Image: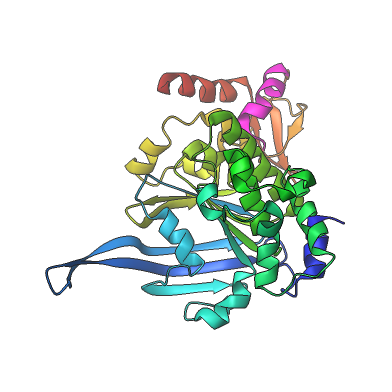
């Protein structure tokens, strides 16, 4: 039994939202923290941690939230989950406006929204075994079944790349990457509709970090979870996100696909932010194609407009005629060697 099937049989949560439908809609979300001073602790100002952010996340997609330290991305993630109460704005999750939900009404909603924290060791009880840590969410929500709970935890461990033999160990017996996998397993235990990953790999060594990034990609494709991936690393966001949200000083600066953000920066801040990104690794053929000329032969190979330039480069260069960019049988444009080389030369000039 797969992790998704097992979760569905053990929880009473609603059925998953169909991919492509709006799972989360946030409108004009604001979170200000008061600055107090003096003996009587009067409010003398506000920290605008989140300042008027609006966004939509579709079921099945990964949204990468990226920005410099202190830009408000972690506060945004926690406010969306209502771990922090918003100052104003609205949060609609799976069709329900949860903005004003208090603790009791939020309890069933929390089964559908889970978080993986940045520091795995701080978020895991050091006195509990991995088996107990994995079973804890099920017990809290009264979904733990005697005799099946142990098998459920073992299945979770396999899903995140750990062995069931690890179930009786304690958190201090694992590496940082393994502890973060345990945190992911706990978040998956209730089969949530939305997972918020708050810089889950930022404290890991480079090699372990890359492995965890690949693990997130694998889980996204195999388990099909909708994810909000928070990071300060733009390259990481571009690698993991279907769409990218860039924040600055609590505000949303730009949101779009990786190709849209790199090819058409919204302002000078974004342009500088993405300046060192290898464009051929992000841009798709839809951004470099051009109309076919009347003297060009339309006998070259076909490729789709969402093909990454880097992946298309060898085939385009080897082709005798321009590559035709086709979508659903319709010719959108063509790409030849010069179009590819312009992107590569632009990268070299930046570096």
Task: Choose top left, top right, bottom left or bottom right for residue 132.
Answer: bottom right
Q: Residue at x 56, y 77 (%)?
A: 106
Q: Which residue lies furthest to the front in this view?
A: 127
**In this picture, is 186 found above or below 81?**
above
Check if residue 315 falls in the magenta segment. Answer: yes
Task: Choose top left, top right, bottom left or bottom right for residue 28.
Answer: bottom left
Left or right, 80 with reference to 166: left
**In this picture, is 261 found above or below 108?**
above
Residue 1 is situated, as x and y percent measured from the top left of the image, at 87, 57
Q: Give the range drawn in magenta.
A: 307-318
Q: Which residue is drawn at 62% across and 30% down?
A: 309
Left or right, 341 with reference to 15: left
Q: How many marks?
A: 0
In the image shown, does 250 or 159 lie closer to the viewer?
159
Q: Which residue is drawn at 73% across and 50% down?
A: 167
In the image shown, does 201 or 66 lie closer to the viewer?
201
Q: Residue at x 57, y 52 (%)?
A: 126
Q: Which residue lies furthest to the right in this view?
A: 1
- Residue 95 visible: no
């Amino acid at each position: 039994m797969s992790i998704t099937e097992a979760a569905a049989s053990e929880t009473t949560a609603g059925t998953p939202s169909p991919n492509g439908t709006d799972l989360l809609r946030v409108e004009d979300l604001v979170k200000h923290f008061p600055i107090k001073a003096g003996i009587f602790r009067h409010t003398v100002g506000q920290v605008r941690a989140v300042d008027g952010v609006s966004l939509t996340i579709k079921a099945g997609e990964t949204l990468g939230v990226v920005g410099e330290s202190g830009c408000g991305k972690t506060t945004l993630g926690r406010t969306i989950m209502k771990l922090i109460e918003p100052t104003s704005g609205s949060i609609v999750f799976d069709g329900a406006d949860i903005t004003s939900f208090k603790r009791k009404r939020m309890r069933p909603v929390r089964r559908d929204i889970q978080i993986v924290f940045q520091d795995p060791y701080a978020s895991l009880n050091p006195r509990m075994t991995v088996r107990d840590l994995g079973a804890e969410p099920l017990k809290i929500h009264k979904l733990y079944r005697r005799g099946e709970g142990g098998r459920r935890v073992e299945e979770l461990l396999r899903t995140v790349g750990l062995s069931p033999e690890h179930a009786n160990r304690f958190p201090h017996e694992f590496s940082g990457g393994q502890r973060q996998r345990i945190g992911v397993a706990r978040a998956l235990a209730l089969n949530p509709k939305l997972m918020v990953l708050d810089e889950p790999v930022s404290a890991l060594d480079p090699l372990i970090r890359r492995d965890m990034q690949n693990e997130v990609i694998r889980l996204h494709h195999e388990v099909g979870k909708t994810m909000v991936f928070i990071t300060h690393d733009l390259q990481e966001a571009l690698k993991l996100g279907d769409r990218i949200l860039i924040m600055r000083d609590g505000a949303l600066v730009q949101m779009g696909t990786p190709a849209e953000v790199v090819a058409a920066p919204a302002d000078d801040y974004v342009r500088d932010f993405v300046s060192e990104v290898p464009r051929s690794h992000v841009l798709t053929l839809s951004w470099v194609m051009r109309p076919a000329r009347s003297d060009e032969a339309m006998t070259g190979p076909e490729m789709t407009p969402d093909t990454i330039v880097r992946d298309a480069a060898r085939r385009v260069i080897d082709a005798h005629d321009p590559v035709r960019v086709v979508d659903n049988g319709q010719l959108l444009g063509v790409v030849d060697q010069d179009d590819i080389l312009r992107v590569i030369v632009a990268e070299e000039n930046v570096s």
